[in-house]
Amino acid sequence: MTSYTVRIESLDQEVECREDQNILDACLRNGVWLPHACTHGTCGTCKVEILDGDVNHGDASEFALMEYERNEGKTLVCVATPESDVVIDADVESEEGVTMHPVRDFEGTLVALEDCARETRRLVFDLDDELSFNAGQYVQVTLPNTDGVFRSWSMANSPASPKQIELTIKRTPGGLGTDGWIFKDLKVGDKVKIAGPYGRFFVRTAKEKPIIMIGGGTGLAPLKSMVKHVLEEDTGQTMHLYHGVRGYEDLYDVEYFKQLEADHEDQFFYHPCLSEEEGVEGTSHGMVTDVIDEDFKTLRGMVAYICGPPPMVEASLKMLMKKRLFPRDTYREDFFDASDKETGGTRSPLMRTN
Ligand SMILES: Cc1cc2nc3c(=O)[nH]c(=O)nc-3n(C[C@H](O)[C@H](O)[C@H](O)COP(=O)(O)OP(=O)(O)OC[C@H]3O[C@@H](n4cnc5c(N)ncnc54)[C@H](O)[C@@H]3O)c2cc1C
Ligand code: FES
């Protein structure tokens, strides 16, 4: 198989990249960290400029990489493969106190499978080696009986348990990975290929400000990892966790979070919100954004982490701006799926990508 050299001019680094490998993958596996979020050509976070050489743009969404951008020599490295030696210019900001872990391959053995909420499953995999990651990151799981098709799912466990990962996954009707596998014939004992860690949605413990977390549905997963990490590492931030779902049947880990709240009564506050059910004890009624709007006069001086379906993430960003919490202290993870690539579920042009 032919390999090419990819030079990242701005970092003064070079990696070898196979002709069938995306440039981001080659970089992340060689300890060269480039900004990325969705890793399937949908969000545009990994856009770079090609200074020299040719690439195949792969499966880049035409919304995330417009025709004029292709003509201007831009590409999305998460789906672009080299067709010659390539020189790229990437905008990489280093963050103080943050270690980025190289991507590696693991074999996972499913040791627990549970229906934890409506159309939602919790999966626990034992790994064949330790997976170092930052709380909030995700893994790619290769779907069985496919030609290397993978899906991204966020780890709900904290980095303190590196040989076992917990995933919580919602069924997507017609979805290849969920309807076609996890909710169909996946069983305890099955072995899967897992790669990670990916993403830049992780808790910044160096920021001492109080934290507000907003999770829609299984968007709770990376936030759970963050909450556990902050408490385990005793980094001291106050955390308000808002979990937005439709009805009580969609909530999960309620007892777990209530217990954390009792154990850390001045530090951790749990707010389950039901948009379609009223009068359920211990929950608020309304869209999670409206509940927060009511609860806080201002969010100035806080750090926000938002995760879930793209429309909920967008609505949350608007609400945060209104409450004086601006993009430099806002981190987001959009749970894009295959349909978003076709319909342009891209980031709001209003927002800087954190
Ligand atoms: C960074 C990241 C982290 C994530 N973490 C989680 C998590 O922790 N938990 C979780 O539940 N989800 C998570 N997701 C979402 C997850 O990756 C999957 O997208 C989701 O589980 C659906 O996968 P699927 O294979 O079942 O559906 P897909 O096969 O991707 O299909 C999704 C939908 O799109 C439709 N579709 C498929 N192809 C097309 C097409 N060409 N045109 C139009 N429509 C199409 C399908 O019919 C289906 O309705 C995450 C996503 C990202 C990007
Ligand atoms: S990370 Fe490449 S487009 Fe999202």
Image (tube, helix red, strand yellow):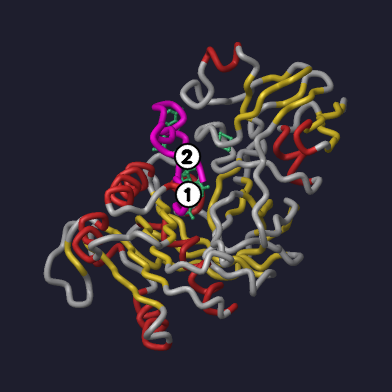
Q: Position of residue 173 (x, y in %)?
A: 37, 43
State the mark number for residue 352.
2
Does 260 sit left or right of 41 as displayed?
Answer: left
Residue 228 part of the magenta segment: no
Residue at the image position 18 percent from the left and 59 percent from the top = 286
State the residue in front, 205 or 129. Answer: 205
The answer to whether the residues at label 1 and label 2 have Cβ atoms under 8 Å apart is yes
State the residue in front, 252 or 84. Answer: 84
Range shown magenta: 329-354
State the residue in front, 188 or 331. Answer: 331
Q: Position of residue 213 (x, y in %)?
A: 40, 62
Q: Amino acid at mark 2?
A: Arg
Could you classify mark 2 by the number of other residues whose Cα lies within 10 Å: few (under 14), some (14-19), or many (20 or more)? Answer: few
Give the CA distance from mark 1 to mark 2. Answer: 8 Å
Q: Amino acid at mark 1?
A: Arg
Counting the numbered discs, the total is 2
> As displayed, is residue 253 above or below residue 87?
below
Q: Secondary structure at mark 1?
A: helix
State the mark number for residue 307.
none
The quadrant in which residue 246 appears is: bottom left
Residue at the image position 75 percent from the left and 52 percent from the top = 102
Residue 346 part of the magenta segment: yes
State the residue in front, 278 or 172. Answer: 278
Does 28 sit left or right of 283 as displayed?
Answer: right
Q: Where does label 1 land, which residue?
A: 328
Q: Position of residue 69 (x, y in %)?
A: 56, 17
Q: Is mark 1 within 8 Å of ligand 2?
A: no
Instruction: Locate the N terminus by quadrant.
Output: top right
Q: Secondary structure at mark 2?
A: loop
